[in-house]
Image (cartoon, rainbow, N blue to C red):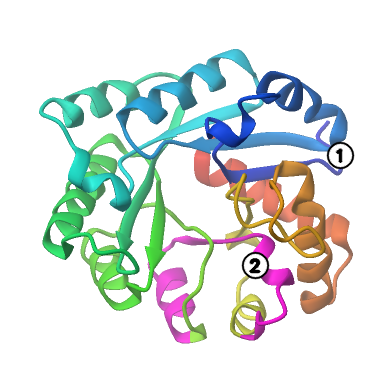
Amino acid sequence: MDGNLIFDTHAHYDDAAFDSDRDELLSSLPERGVCGVVNCGTDVKTSAVSLALAEKYPFVYAACGIHPEECEKIQPGDFAALTSLLQRERAVAVGEIGLDHHWDIPNELQREIFERQLKMAVQLDLPVIVHDREAHGETLELLKKYRPKGVLHSFSGSVEMAKDVLSIGMYLGFGGAVTFKKAKKVLEVLEVVPFDRLLLETDCPYMAPEPYRGRRNDSTFIKYAVERIAEVKGVDPGYVISESRQAAKTLFGV
């Protein structure tokens, strides 16, 4: 039985921040309250590493995709390689994919790569894990166009956008940002998100919650986000954990 165990739907344990203790940390997660992790690739290489981690640890699953920040580094054959990775048993999603208008990356190229992967996800009948940074309108436009299964990770849009995303059947991911002092907008969004569409995530090693903001994040820190979500929703923290775990298992088919 999973009991009160957490499912982290967005992690990057392939990151260099974990090079010194990756195996030790991952091996310890089940006894520290974590029953599932989706490790997200950001290019073909990290997607392959994510799959290797998923094949080594029975509670880890892989998402394979090309992140918008990696769009300018794409090589011939990358999409064929990505398609091959996504057909492996431990691959459960196309991700991390999306749009990022924070960085100076050609928008047309980002959009082309995002759309190509949205089509791939629909064809393979896999959910998407979507990165949306300062690109809310365009992201929503493309999600409405392709209507994939999936999650908008680390959701930072408005209540109105959240309702639109939910209306097309997608999920919303929340992590350490709900604990930040300037989290007013995301807390308003939380109030309208039903538990069967709410996913917990870390984005580790990034986005550590208060009181550990700025430090290396890992899946065990989700408990701080859980406490804040429970407070906002007026429920017991255990309820947040169990409902979000079921939502994760439903979306990723695990």
Question: Left or right: 188 with respect to 4?
Answer: left
Q: Which x, y percent locates residue 74?
A: 18, 37
In the rendered structure, the answer to whether residue 248 lies left or right of residue 91 reads: right
Res. 194 image quadrant: bottom right
Could you tell whether 142 is left or right of 195 in the image? left
Q: Amino acid at mark 1?
A: Gly
Q: Quadrant of residue 89?
A: top left
Report the front residue among 171 and 134.
134
Q: Is residue 94 above or below residue 142?
A: above
Q: Quadrant of the C terminus?
A: top right
Q: Is residue 218 magenta?
A: no
Can you identify the residue that label 1 sits on? 3
The residue range painted magenta reads 160-184
Regarding mark 1 in the picture, which secondary structure is present there?
A: loop
Residue 246: x and y in percent read 67, 47
Q: Nearer the viewer, mark 2 or mark 1?
A: 2
Is residue 162 within the magenta segment?
A: yes
Q: Which of the pair 217/124 is nearer the observer?
A: 217
Quadrant in which the N terminus is drawn: top right
Q: Which residue is mark 2?
A: 177
